[in-house]
Amino acid sequence: MSTYPIRDVEGNIIGFRGVSRDVTERKQAEQALHESEARYRAVLEANPDPLVVFDREGRVVYSNPAFSEVFGWSAEELEGRVMEKFIPDDHLDEGRRMAEQMISGERFSGIETERFTRSGERIPVGISGSGYRDARGTFMGGIVTLRDIREKKRMEEQLLNIHKLESIGTLAGGIAHDFNNLLMAVQGNVSLALYNFDEEHPHYRLFRNIEKSVKSGSRLTSQLLGFARKGRYEVKPVDLNRLVDDVAKTFGRTRKDIIIHSDSAGDLSAVEADEGQLEQMLLNIFMNAGEAMPSGGDLFLATKNMVLEKPDTNFVELEPGRYVQLSVRDTGVGMDRETMDHVFEPFFTTREMGHGTGLGMASVYGIVKGHGGHIEVRSSVGGGTAFDIYLPASDTPLQAEGAEQQDVVKPGKETILLVDDEDMVLTVGGQMLERLGYDVLKSSCGADAMALCESHRERIDLVVLDMVMPGMSGGQVFDHLREKYPGIRVLLSSGYSLEGQAREIMDRGCDGFIQKPFTIQELATRIREILD
């Protein structure tokens, strides 16, 4: 409404004139614009990703709460400011190219780069952006959305490490398998010599020392197989509390300067595991802790039940379910970030050359993964180290411990077909069988083995079959034998352990398994277990 006075000739006000205009549409437009601004501001402020709007001079005209949360600057601090030192120097050219793209009307999306926070921390981010223009098409500024990808990068690094360790594990397993074949030749010849020597023989002690060295070499290959997740032999429900207590007592007797503290859950679930492998895992961790505490210290052990109800980014390899958690923490010298990144790699060691193989923690990793578990390490220089291990819980009740049986040499008179592609293993294995009294047929490949079975089927009482062979593998030979001769008995032999392919063959009905290198006593026992 607009009004003005009406005056007479003398200037006196004698009335008013006015104009009223209906502004309903304008008010409705203003209200709609206000609501639209409020709606879009709410959308921007609800955006979980940081967002910042710049004018054509690069000054900030708007930033949302997520930007403040991730990067630390408040909206008030940023408004009207050109953000200096936000882009690292080595990404400045990249930032200029992004600005040029926005000015020219191009968009960019999902570019992974880095930016600084207010505190100076350099973090990885994903950036998307585009320019905005007025009604005449004039460039007014840019809108940039940033995504904090620290968690994504952490998961990618974790998965990359897993894949790298899996590749190394495949290589380590192959080396261990071949090395076990070499040890088999040595062990076989030693067994043959000792079979005829008594303790008074002048060479008896020499051959015993060789046998001890073979066993030491076998322990090294066992650690490699553990890292390669091929080291489980006899899986059964295991009481982890008892096992931890037993190994801790053994370790404690060797390091009385280390005080061991135990916090065990009374209702701890059993775990399906190979007890020997878990013993090796624990001993390796304890010895690693001991190395970190040369002048003594404290070792804290704790167990508890845990339920993973849904997939968790902290446990990328674990399925939801029930787990048993074991924590081992020491008060030693700790590790820096670089050492932590390599701690589970085989042959990595911080000790001097000649002191340690670098296989201890690698085998720990392999044993945990081979049992379907997960391991984490936390450490800082001077702050000690902690390992958190998660193993699947078992519903199977624990079994009573049985008395350990000693291997007894039992000779025989049956006919045995020995199949192995390694000439040295074939030779020494045949000699061991002959020394035990068996009639021996030998074959260096699957095709020849099948031909011998065809021509000597009535004579053959048992096939000692190597698992890894070129051409027809041991598994293929076994399947062909069982299909053609359903009742034939087979003892599987391998430089690998029982898990993996060997376990699959055993599940298909194979009669027994023996791991190289084995003694003549072990071979005799396995054969009689099957034939008797």
Image (spheres, grey):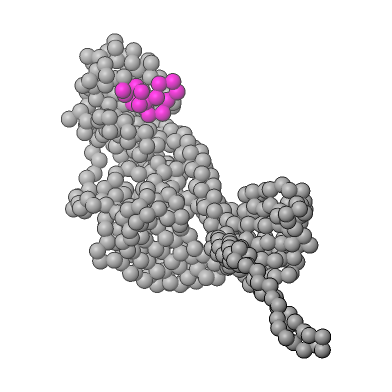
Left or right: 110, with 132 as reference point? left
Examine the image and state in which quarter residue 492 appears. top left
Q: Vertically, is 364 above or below 204?
A: below
Q: Quadrant of the C terminus?
A: top left
Examine the image and state in which quarter residue 83 appears. bottom right
Task: Magenta stretch: give its range.
Answer: 465-479
Please say whether residue 171 is visible from this viewpoint.
yes
Q: Vertically, is 478 above or below 215?
A: above
Q: Is residue 138 magenta?
A: no
Nearest the viewer among 503 and 442 is 503
As drawn, which residue projects farthest toward the front?
A: 9
Q: Quadrant of the N terminus?
A: bottom right
At 37% from the left and 15% from the top, the residue drawn is 448
Nearest the viewer among 112 and 192 is 112
At 38% from the left and 43% from the top, the residue drawn is 231
At 74% from the left and 62% from the top, the residue drawn is 55
Please say whether residue 179 is visible from this viewpoint.
no
| Spot occupied by residue 238 in the image (x, y as percentages of width and height) | 27, 53
| Spot occupied by residue 97 in the image (x, y as percentages of width and height) | 76, 51
- Total marks shown come to 0
Nearest the viewer among 80 and 240 is 80
| Spot occupied by residue 268 in the image (x, y as percentages of width and height) | 27, 61
| Spot occupied by residue 278 in the image (x, y as percentages of width and height) | 35, 53
Left or right: 155, with 233 as reference point? right
At 25% from the left and 35% from the top, the residue drawn is 525
As drawn, which residue projects farthest toward the top?
A: 455
Q: Is residue 469 magenta?
A: yes
Left or right: 18, with 271 as reference point? right
